[in-house]
Every structure is written in C-alpha cells, then in structure tokens.
Image: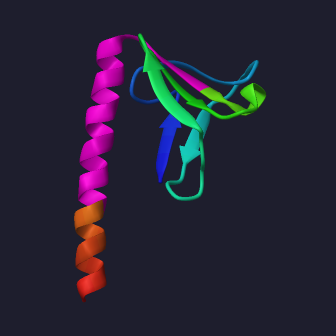
C-alpha cells in the first residue's frame, strides 16, 4: 500500500478530476487503473472516467524520479519481508 500525500515528496498538488485532494492511497491488487503514466513532472492514474482519474504534480521532474526510486525500494523491501514472513 502506498500513500501519496501533498505533505511529502515535494508534491505541489493532487487532483481528482477538478477537485484538490490532500492524499491518495494506492493498494496494489485492489486499486485498478487503465493507465499509469508520466508527463514532465506529473504522474497520472487514469481510468475510463476522467472525473475519477488522479493527477499528482511534483515540483520538478527530478522529484518525480526520486519518488519512483523510493517506491521501487519500498516494493523490493516489502517483497523481501513478505517472502520471509511466508517461510516461517
């Protein structure tokens, strides 16, 4: 589970359609989006209903890159810890 919040990771704004929101929680395997893509310093979590799509704006492209780096590290750590828990 990932929480993306305006208070962290140098995020300028998070919008769902026309509405500003403070944070979003993404739960792998539960949340489904047709596309997740980036353009410049934006990441888009989109589906067929644009009003329900989420757009996260970072201060810079470098901040977006750092976010993905941190996210991949957390995923790897969760996979390692998850595998360890299953083997006990």
Specify whether 5 is left or right of 80: right
Q: Which coloring applies here?
A: rainbow
Q: Residue at x 31, y 52 (%)?
A: 75
Q: Residue 63 magenta-drawn? A: yes
The image quadrant that residue 9 belongs to is top left
Magenta segment main secondary structure: helix
Q: Nearer the viewer, residue 36 or 20?
A: 36
- Residue range highlighted in magenta: 55-78
Specify whether 56 is left or right of 75: right
Q: Residue at x 59, y 35 (%)?
A: 23
Q: What quarter of the picture does the C terminus occupy?
A: bottom left
Q: Residue 72 magenta-drawn? A: yes
Asked if 67 appears above or below 81 in the picture, the reply is: above
Position in image of residue 43 (x %, y %): 48, 24
Position in image of residue 5 (x %, y %): 52, 33
Specify whether 60 is left or right of 52: left
Asked if 28 appears above or below 83 in the picture, the reply is: above
The image quadrant that residue 61 belongs to is top left
Position in image of residue 21 (x %, y %): 67, 28
Q: Residue at x 67, y 30 (%)?
A: 53
């Amino acid at each position: 589970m990932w929480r993306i919040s305006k208070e962290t990771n140098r995020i300028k704004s998070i919008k769902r359609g026309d509405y500003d929101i403070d944070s979003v929680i993404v739960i792998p395997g539960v949340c489904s989006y047709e596309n997740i893509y980036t353009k410049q310093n934006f990441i888009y979590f989109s589906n067929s209903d644009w009003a329900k799509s989420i757009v996260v704006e970072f201060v810079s492209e470098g901040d977006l890159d750092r976010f993905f780096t941190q996210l991949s590290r957390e995923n790897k750590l969760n996979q390692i810890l998850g595998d360890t828990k299953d083997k006990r």
